[in-house]
């Protein structure tokens, strides 16, 4: 290669985006061959109908790159040669060949419910295996939901049997029933949720100054009775509890607390730092395991319980706009034997929207809800691919092997793929 002595020799794809995709002639290094093999696979053998490849080499050097007031955290990334329509048409985007193993032979994505303007499908996507149902919480706060100070957001559920029956369709609105779950006493402003000992934990964000943020445990069957696990830190109100996860190894309950109730005008001024707490269920003791966030949000653990992943949505100020320089970041911690967190590490920064709900699969890959759907990273933080919705997902969850339910505020999706989730508690 003539460019051998320049830095560009390490990246032959820089010749041009179009040439890089199919240029067999420049295949001189093993790396190049690998890249090209990946593209040729796509062309010659064809990917599954809902899958397309978007190798990073095809957009690493763009002819023009717009400034921050045009391309920023609120805008979608449309790679060269793509349109919003083409991205949605084949919604499984392969940025790295390893994503094909996660997707399997014929991944599917189905829109199963549309709630109009009501963000009914916001967070707490929790699969309850005994009845094969999935529970999901409405967004607390948005004016379109009429929630916040006026009324508590509600919990809904769907049956996976109904979702499975329509997985060969792209749009199955109306074919999957959405049922309201009347918890009693009610979970006030539920947000995050997770399985726990045959029940479901919900974080409640609180309401006004007199209903404190609360960690609830709910019976997933009628009469949907609930109990309070924690509602204070040594007598002080939390800010607004956001998400909760149980560590598979030590069975301790970890939850995040952040200021979104205040930033959505339904909670008073925050009285504590935004931080991650741990509840030892054997003793009821609550400790703080991590701080130094702008706004900590989602939390999960790797399949073996060794790592914790915590998202920071510092870029989102909810009713008060965006901060393009704020965090949309996943941090990874090592979970020590005693359940404390150590070795905070920058794991990934999502380029589109805010990185919110986060979950691992059984192989340690990390999935998060972001501004255009679900992004999937390998354990080293390289983006493997996306489940592209063209709209934001705050949370989602594996619902048994190869099945996933994805909340997108007013829309609910059902996906099938090869991967399976980390074990549930
Ligand atoms: C981000 O980009 C969008 C779309 O181009 C634009 O409307 C918005 O004003 C930008 N935001 C900022 C903070 O510049
Ligand atoms: C629901 O009620 C049953 C029967 O009283 C009780 O055993 C169970 O612990 C309750 N569940 C919760 C989450 O409060």
Image: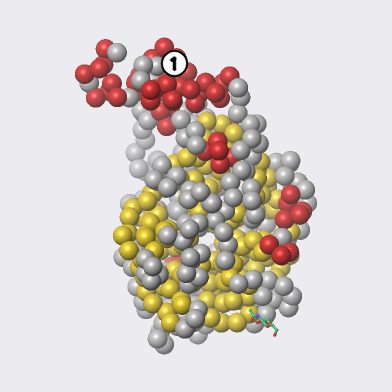
Residue occupying the far bottom of the picture: 235
Depth order, front residue of 156/215: 215
Q: Quadrant of the C terminus?
A: bottom right
Question: Is 148 located above or below residue 55 in the figure?
Answer: below
Q: Which residue is drawn at the image coordinates 70% and 53% (left, top)?
A: 113
Depth order, front residue of 269/172: 172
In the figure, is residue 257 to the left or right of 359? left
Element type at mark 1? loop
Q: Which residue is drawn at the image coordinates 41% and 73% (left, top)?
A: 277
Q: In which quarter of the image is the N terminus?
A: top left
For residue 43, which quarter of the picture?
top right
Picture coordinates of residue 231 (x, y %)? Answer: 49, 82
For residue 168, which quarter of the picture?
top right
- Can residue 147 be seen from the camera position used here? no
Picture coordinates of residue 348 (x, y %)? Answer: 38, 49
Question: Is 341 located above or below residue 374 in the figure?
Answer: below
Q: Residues within 10 Å of mark 1 (few under 14, many from 20)?
A: some
Q: Which residue is drawn at the image coordinates 51% and 49% (left, top)?
A: 363
Q: How many marks?
A: 1
Depth order, front residue of 379/371: 379
Question: Is 298 located above or below residue 378 in the figure?
Answer: below
Residue occupying the far left of the picture: 5
Q: Which residue is drawn at the image coordinates 58% and 62% (left, top)?
A: 424
For residue 62, which quarter of the picture?
top left
Q: Which colour assignment does the render follow?
A: secondary structure
In the figure, is residue 331 to the left or right of 191? left
Mark 1 C-beta to ligand 1 under 8 Å: no
In this figure, which residue is indicated by the disc labeled 1? 23
Picture coordinates of residue 417 (x, y %)? Answer: 62, 43
Picture coordinates of residue 115 (x, y %)? Answer: 67, 57
């Amino acid at each position: 290669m003539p460019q051998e002595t320049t830095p560009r020799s390490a990246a032959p794809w820089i010749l041009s985006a179009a040439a890089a995709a199919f240029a067999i002639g420049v295949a001189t290094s093993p790396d190049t061959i690998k890249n090209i093999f990946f593209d040729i696979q796509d062309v010659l053998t064809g990917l599954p109908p809902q899958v397309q490849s978007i190798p990073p080499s095809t957009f690493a050097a763009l002819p023009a790159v717009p400034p921050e007031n045009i391309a920023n955290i609120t805008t979608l990334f449309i790679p060269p040669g793509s349109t919003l329509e083409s991205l949605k048409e084949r919604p499984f985007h392969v940025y790295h060949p390893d994503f094909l193993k996660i997707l399997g032979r014929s991944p599917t994505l189905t829109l199963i419910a549309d709630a109009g303007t009501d963000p009914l499908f916001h967070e707490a996507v929790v699969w309850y295996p005994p009845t094969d149902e999935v529970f999901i919480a409405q967004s607390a706060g948005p004016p379109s939901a009429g929630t916040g100070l006026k009324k508590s957001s509600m919990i809904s559920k769907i049956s996976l049997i109904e979702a499975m029956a329509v997985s060969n369709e792209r749009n199955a609105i109306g074919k999957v029933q959405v049922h309201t779950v009347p918890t009693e006493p009610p979970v006030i402003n539920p947000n995050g949720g997770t399985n726990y000992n045959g029940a479901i934990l919900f974080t409640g964000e609180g309401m006004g100054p007199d209903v404190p943020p609360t960690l609830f445990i709910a019976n997933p069957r009628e009469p949907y009775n609930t109990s309070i696990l924690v509602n204070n830190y040594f007598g002080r109100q939390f800010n607004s509890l956001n998400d909760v996860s149980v560590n598979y190894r030590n069975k301790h309950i970890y939850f995040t607390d952040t200021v979104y109730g205040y930033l959505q005008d339904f909670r008073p001024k925050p009285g504590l730092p935004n931080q991650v707490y741990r509840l030892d269920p054997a003793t009821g003791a609550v400790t703080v395991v991590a701080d130094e966030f702008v706004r900590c949000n989602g939390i999960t653990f790797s399949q073996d319980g060794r790592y914790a992943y915590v998202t920071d949505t510092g870029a989102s100020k909810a009713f008060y706009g965006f901060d393009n320089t704020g965090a949309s970041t996943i941090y990874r911690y090592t979970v020590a034997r005693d359940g404390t967190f150590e070795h905070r590490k920058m794991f990934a920064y999502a380029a589109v929207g805010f990185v919110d709900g986060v979950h691992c699969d059984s192989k340690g890959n990390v999935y998060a809800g972001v501004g255009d759907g679900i992004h999937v990273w390998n354990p080293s933080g390289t983006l493997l691919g996306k489940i592209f919705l063209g709209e934001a997902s705050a949370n989602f969850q594996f619902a048994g092997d190869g099945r996933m339910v994805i909340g997108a505020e007013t829309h609910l999706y059902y996906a099938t793929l090869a991967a399976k989730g980390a074990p549930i508690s």
